[in-house]
Image: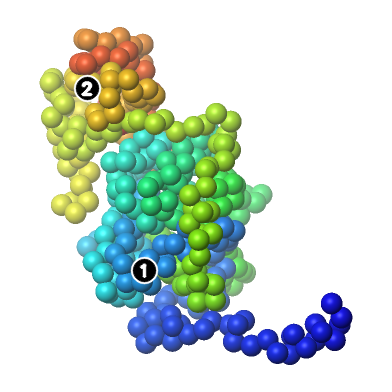
């Protein structure tokens, strides 16, 4: 094609094709919501490290919203998503703010907006229990696990996060999945060789890159505002964090605004390039093999947490059922604080309910609370109907905050397997608190 012909085509092309066409950006409701954002949109865009490259899942979700249809959105994660750091009963946590934005912006349908976070749990818990927390008709899932999964490169929490992603990505609606990262500040910030790379942000980023997922990061959002020699008062660490691992009300606002900014950018894209069959084809494509070799998700898992775990107990000597949470956000479990306390419970280890007697790959594990203080040790054993190797759980972990840990016990298959948790006199914390459950 001649150079003159190229110039003619360029001069005749409509300029409007290069800009947003109107609908979403010109709505009064959108202008009102954007005005309430905590940072300028230019700054918020810095937190969007990647849109994933393939935005087909996000486009399908937002096209459904723009058609006026009801959607199911689920937030999962640990204590941050649960609301830690925000003012109690204020609805200022990031998921409440985001859900309010979605309802205000798309009021035509009755959306299902769920916060299914479990405080103090890493991905290794949710990878087993995701079907209990995330409904099968989910259209968008936002996962926040950077703090709780630690900073290891290929440890169990990292591999569990990949298994969690693989389960979510093959849900029936082929939901959009967003990785939302809060930055964990090192205690000795000035002594770290590279505080920017202190925690697991980069490892989360690799998984997001591998599965072409949107990656939104508080580290990328706030670094150039907070770490300059003389930051503005509203940009200091203290201004937007409650502690080194949790945002305050302001920080929760940043998380919510990053997500809404990302979603509006995808809507801008839909203005220019309407949804097409290729989006459905991309979303339905078969997953690549796991990034960690052989790290396939188990097809069947039973998860017995919270109130579902309570009636399984048949012996509760020294254990009491305690709820340390609130009506909206319960934190329930069997708790013991004295050596010799015994909790016995009966579960079926031969089959996951609803999967048939030939089911394979049933996960069997004990979840227990671990912390840097108060926690004790317990022996876990199989005492009737099944066999397993006895193991000792130790809830005292130096240098880490409170979270749920998982210990695999691998009992033999049985219709009724009686397991025992016995609090031991041994302790490295000086105390004996034990809080077990069963995913």
* Number of numbered labels in the structure image: 2
Q: Residue 253 in the image: x percent, y percent?
A: 39, 68
Q: Residue at x 85, y 86 (%)?
A: 4
Q: Residue at x 60, y 68 (%)?
A: 224
**SS at circle 1:** helix
User: According to the image, label 2 marks what residue?
Assistant: 347
Is the residue marked by circle 2 packed among few (<14), some (14-19), or many (20+) residues within 10 Å?
Answer: some
**SS at circle 2:** strand
Q: Is 148 located above or below residue 245 in the figure?
A: above
- In the rendered image, the quadrant that contains the N terminus is bottom right
Dot 2 or dot 1: first in sequence order is 1
Marks 2/1: CA distance? Answer: 42 Å
Observer-nearest of 250 and 51:
51
Is the residue marked by circle 1 packed among few (<14), some (14-19), or many (20+) residues within 10 Å?
Answer: many
Q: Is 279 located above or below residue 211 in the figure?
A: below
Q: Residue 364 in the image: x percent, y percent?
A: 33, 24
User: According to the image, label 1 marks what residue?
Assistant: 65
Quarter where residue 420 is shown: top left
| Left or right, residue 409 beside residue 40 | left
Q: Residue at x 15, y 32 (%)?
A: 310
Give the image's coloring scheme.
rainbow
Observer-nearest of 27 and 421:
27
Quarter where residue 103 is shown: bottom left
Q: Is 368 located above or below residue 221 in the figure?
A: above
């Amino acid at each position: 094609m001649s150079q003159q012909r190229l110039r003619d085509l360029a001069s005749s092309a409509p300029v409007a094709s290069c800009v947003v066409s109107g609908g979403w950006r010109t709505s009064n409701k959108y202008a009102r919501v954007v005005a309430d954002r905590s940072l300028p949109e230019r700054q918020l865009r810095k937190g969007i490290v990647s849109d994933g490259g393939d935005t087909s899942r996000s486009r399908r979700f937002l096209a459904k919203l723009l058609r006026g249809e009801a959607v199911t959105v689920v937030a999962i994660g640990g204590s941050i998503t649960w609301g830690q750091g925000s003012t109690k009963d204020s609805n200022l946590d990031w998921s409440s703010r985001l859900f309010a934005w979605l309802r205000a912006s798309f009021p035509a349908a009755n959306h299902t907006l769920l916060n299914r976070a479990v405080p103090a749990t890493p991905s290794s818990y949710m990878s087993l229990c995701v079907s209990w927390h995330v409904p099968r008709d989910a259209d968008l899932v936002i996962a926040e696990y950077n703090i709780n999964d630690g900073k290891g490169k290929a440890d169990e929490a990292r591999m569990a996060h990949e298994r969690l992603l693989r389960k979510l990505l093959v849900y029936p609606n082929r939901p959009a999945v967003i990785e939302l990262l809060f930055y964990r500040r090192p205690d000795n910030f000035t002594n770290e060789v590279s505080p920017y790379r202190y925690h697991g942000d980069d490892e989360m980023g690799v998984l997001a890159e591998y599965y072409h997922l949107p990656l939104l990061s508080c580290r990328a959002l706030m670094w150039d505002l907070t770490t300059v020699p003389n930051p503005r008062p509203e940009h200091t660490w203290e201004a937007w964090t409650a502690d080194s691992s949790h945002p305050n009300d302001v920080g929760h606002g940043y998380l919510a605004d990053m997500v809404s900014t990302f979603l509006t950018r995808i809507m801008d894209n839909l203005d220019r390039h309407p949804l097409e069959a290729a989006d459905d084809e991309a979303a339905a494509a078969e997953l690549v093999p796991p990034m960690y070799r052989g790290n396939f998700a188990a097809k069947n898992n039973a998860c017995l947490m919270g109130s579902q775990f309570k009636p399984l107990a048949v012996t509760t000597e020294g254990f009491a059922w305690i709820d340390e949470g609130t009506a909206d956000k319960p934190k329930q479990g069997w708790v013991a604080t004295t050596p010799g306390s015994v909790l016995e419970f009966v579960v079926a280890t031969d089959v996951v309910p609803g999967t048939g007697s030939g089911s394979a790959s049933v996960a069997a594990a004990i979840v227990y609370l671990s912390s840097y203080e108060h926690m004790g040790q317990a022996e876990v054993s199989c005492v009737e109907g099944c066999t397993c190797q006895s193991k000792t759980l130790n809830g005292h972990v130096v240098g880490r905050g409170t979270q749920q840990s998982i210990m695999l016990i691998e009992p033999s298959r049985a219709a009724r397997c009686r397991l025992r948790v016995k609090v031991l006199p041994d302790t490295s914390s000086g105390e004996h608190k034990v809080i077990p459950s069963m995913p």
